[in-house]
Image (cartoon, grey):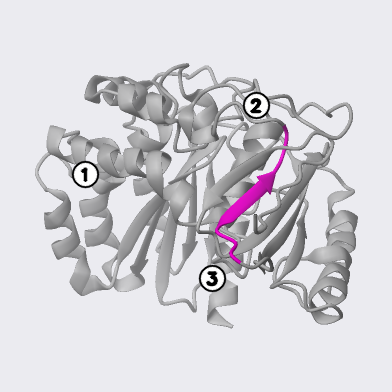
Amino acid sequence: MKMKKLFSVFSLLIFTLFAAVDAMALDVVELPLPRSNKVVIELMFRNGSICDPAGKEGLTSLTADVVADGGTGNMSSSDITDKIYPWAANFGNSTDKEVSIFTFEVPAEYLTPFWDVVKGLILHPSFKQEDFDRVKSNQQNYVDQLIRQSSDEEYGKKYLEDMLFRGTNYQPMTLGTSEGVRSITLDDLRRHYTNFFTRNNVSIGIAGNYPASFVATLKSDIGQLSPVSPEIPAAGKATMPDGLNVEIIAKDNALGSAISAGFPLPITRSNNDFVALMVANSWLGEHRKSYSRLYQKIREARSMNYGDYTYIEWYPNGGGNMLPPFGSPRSSNYFSIWIRPVGTAVEGASGSIWIRPPLEASPAQGRSLSSAMPASLCIEFAV
């Protein structure tokens, strides 16, 4: 029950912030919970990967990661971790297509000393070369190797997204492309931080058991950010394909098959029809719900695979999340189907095949791919 309540708090903050950030600078969304023993602070910057310059794909994500995983003017990352550990406090960040979010959690009794420490990450990031090199190396490894090797399921879904939004600023992965990440310099980070992490594109959310006076402190501190008013690009839209296109991606030593399919969807959470669509989607194939029709027909009745789900918005890391993660509000949307892996059935099989539109390059390689389609299909099977 506590996890559900915490999830609800995060979700409410995120989507209220997404709506509020256009209304006024330094808008604060409050959710007082006097009976809670903790405080959660969210800082949401309207930027995201759509703000990455051409040839520097992954810059927004890398900037946010270095800010959160680096140090301040007088404390290293290790110093900060050692300082807040006894308080059972933590912080983290995420970047999606249209937003970057920093989350801070702390027991209510330690709110003031905790904020005095971590606000320096946002206001005075150190941007040391060693922190930049360490975080960039991790991101480079992700786009070069990890996304392709660690989870065929997640790679397939990202590839589907790459294909549906081909030619737009929604096409590249949030963490960028191989060439894009490799080209980013520390000076690029400093400029991007100044121009796109400012007091004019941020909203503040706070929930929990906090004193009313702390809100004024929070606004005053965040008001010290850069005064730049960033020009945020319009979010790319998926184009409805003409006809069915199929793409095949072969991988060695795969143990199963997976299918992803999708097409553009004009409805988002801002539409009145979204609630009705949620009900319909729950009946058809809501994530991890065994009562849905696809699950019952494909897994339960036929024992053909592990799971069968449908989505009416982007759902990060479906293989690990039971509930939709907060932190990825989007204004461009699509419908998708995810058929989780089926075990190989052909004797001597050693490969996996993903069927989608004709392939020219993988999304992590940063080169343009073939045209989109009404429903992209990915299948892994023995060959």
Three-letter amino acid code at the position of disc 2: Ala
Was residue 76 drawn as part of the magenta stretch in this picture? Answer: no
Q: Earlier in the sequence, mark 2 or mark 1?
A: 1
Q: How far apart are marks 2 and 1 (CA)?
A: 29 Å
For the point 63% across and 48% down, which residue is it? 157
Point 58% across, 36% down: residue = 21
Where does label 1 land, which residue? 70
Q: In this view, does 246 lie above or below 157?
A: above
Callout 3 secondary element: helix
Image quadrant where residue 127 sits: top left
Q: Residues within 10 Å of mark 3 (few under 14, many from 20)?
A: few
Which quarter of the image is occupied by the N terminus? bottom right
| Percent position of residue 179, x then y | 39, 24
Badge 1 crowding class, 10 Å Cα cut-off, few under 14, some 14 to 19, many 20 or more, is many
Query: Residue at 28% across / 55% down in the picture?
Result: 115
Q: Nearer the viewer, residue 75 or 162?
A: 162
Task: Please name the amino acid that badge 3 sits on.
Answer: Leu
